Image: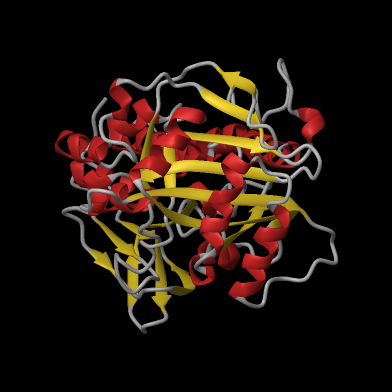
Amino acid sequence: MTSDRKPPEFIISGAGIIGPLLANALKARNIPFVILERDTSLEFREKSGWAITLHYALEAFKNLVPKQKMDPLYDSQVRPNFHKSDSGNFKYINASTGEVVVCIPPSSRIRVRREQIRRVLLDGLEVEWDSKVESIDYHDDLVSVTCSNGKQYTGDVLIGCDGSNSITRRLIDPKEGGLYQLPIRFCGARVQLNKEEFDRISNHFDPLLFQGTVPETNTFFWYSALATPEYTKAPDLYYAQVNLSWNVPETDEPFETQEQKANALKKHSQGLSPELSWLVDRAVQNPEELMEIKLCDWEKVDWDDHDGKVLLALDSLHPMTMYRGSACNEGILDVAELVKQLDLHLQGLFSWKDAVANYRNSVQERARQAVLLSRQACLDAHDMSKIKPNSTSPLLSVRKSK
């Protein structure tokens, strides 16, 4: 069955990873869209230093990206051409001794710099920068948004891809759109290394990434390679992510200064292996570079779509902790499912309302489980009794929601 029905016009709120990924798929289908982004420019958040592992959604990602962007995608890996020799193993260590406790079997994956993959996805797309959504209105079969800069945009569908603190989600669900905050504090930084230091960590632990827990304090340690001279353009300049997280009481006060973050990291690095503690020392040398991530989630994974006029995806729909590496992968699967339902709608097999209902049902079944598994993984990462071979903890079992 075919149809010549007019495709819906999309308003995409958010130019992180998932918004541009969807935009690429829409562009390939000649479906009109506009991307709104609250940041003032592409460079606004690029110094935060973060990387993303694409694993169980990697094939879905490839199917959504134009072929000409695949080579640049692989060029955004934290280590050049690492996918060609990657064993795929994921190591979890006793962070006091450095000994491997669990080694998770290989899986196909690539680990990419967030800012670079974002640039790849945004190449050839226009973005309305400095456009923070402030209100949403509905009239007839259309939806309109008004931004903080006074501009208004109208389309058939608004999709919120605007992060865990999604304005879109809170506007359409003011009563229950708030986040659940876990009793864990997470803080760290991008650190600068030389070749000898970078190689020492790679050879002693893992060349890509690894995690661990300190048994005496249940402090969690996270390391990931981030950049090599091929990217930094300096012969002896490497970067890595170094993060700690720890249990906090309900009465714990938020950090008021960057120095407080540095002091907390120093305190909670006690008990780390000397092979790791120097990395935390390096991180706190520049307190202004330290970044705290609020560990929150939203298990509801449901929303009022206003007769198909509003959708949510990724962190706007299912914010979750990063301890299973699921968040971005789940967001990719969101886009894959939405594009699938959109194609079926354009073929005349479903009304748009039915296509949206199918999307909602699919996402809820899959992502709600992923949110809860990631929550438990976060809690287990701060309980060394859960870190053992043959563990059933979602932190160490197959790192996938289904």
Residue in view at x 78 percent, y 37 percent: 215
Residue in view at x 46 percent, y 44 percent: 353
User: Foreground: 45 or 34?
Assistant: 45
**13 lies left or right of 281:** left
x and y percentages locating residue 307 in the rendered image: 50, 53
Q: Residue furthest bottom?
A: 150
Q: For residue 13, which quarter of the picture?
A: bottom left
**247 lies left or right of 124:** right
Image height of 329 relative to 269, above or below: above
Quadrant where the N terminus is found in the figure:
top left
x and y percentages locating residue 373 in the rendered image: 68, 34
Residue in view at x 16 percent, y 54 percent: 124
x and y percentages locating residue 145 in the rendered image: 41, 71
Number of callouts: 0
Answer whether residue 46 is visible to the viewer in this image: yes
**223 lies left or right of 77:** right
User: Foreground: 288 or 71?
Assistant: 288
Quadrant where the C terminus is found in the figure:
top right
User: Foreground: 166 or 386?
Assistant: 386
Image height of 282 relative to 209, above or below: below
x and y percentages locating residue 272 in the rendered image: 68, 43
Q: For residue 376, which quarter of the picture?
A: top right
- Colour theme: secondary structure
